[in-house]
Image (cartoon, helix red, strand yellow):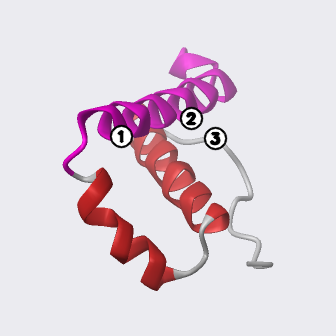
Amino acid sequence: MADTWLTTLHTDTPQEGFELAITLSRRGVKYTQPDAEVLHKLRPEYSTNADSLIAASQVVALNFQTVAAANNYWRK
């Protein structure tokens, strides 16, 4: 995955920032496990596990915190 897709953390709105946080989180998983077959095979296990879902939410929250800080919390 050598493509450059993340050129800035700046977004116009908190909604766009949250969507960027989700994208960062999903891409992190793809970088960690690039084999799509393995990802799909494991999905039934983590998609029904409360601890896994909470951990995924924590990663999104951390990424959103980073994006929000980069955007000065969208203060004008």
Q: Which residue is mark 2?
A: 63
**Hey, which residue is sitting farthest right in the picture?**
2
37 and 17: which is toward the camera: 37
Q: Count all numbered tags in the image, as a single digit.
A: 3
At x 76% / y 71%, what residue is drawn?
Answer: 4
Could you tell me residue 43's position as x and y percent?
31, 64
**Residue furthest left as drawn:** 48
Q: Answer left or right for 63 relative to 45.
A: right
Give the percent coordinates (x, y) of residue 64. 51, 31
In magenta, the rendered stretch is 48-75
Whichever of labels 1 and 2 marks the residue nearer the N terminus, that label is 1
Instruction: Return the disc, 3 or 2, that comes first in the chain's sequence.
Output: 3
Up/down of 47 relative to 42, above or below? above
Between label 1 and label 2, give the one nearer the viewer.
1
Q: Helix, strand or loop at disc 3?
A: loop
Amino acid at dot 3? His
| Badge 2 amino acid | Asn
CB under 8 Å between discs 3 and 1: no
Q: Position of residue 62 (x, y in %)?
A: 55, 27
Q: How far is disc 3 from disc 2 in space, using C-alphas? A: 13 Å
Q: Earlier in the sequence, mark 3 or mark 1?
A: 3
Residue position marked by numbered label 3 in the rendering: 10
The one of 30 and 23 positioned closer to us in this rendering: 30
For mark 1, what is the residue? Answer: 52
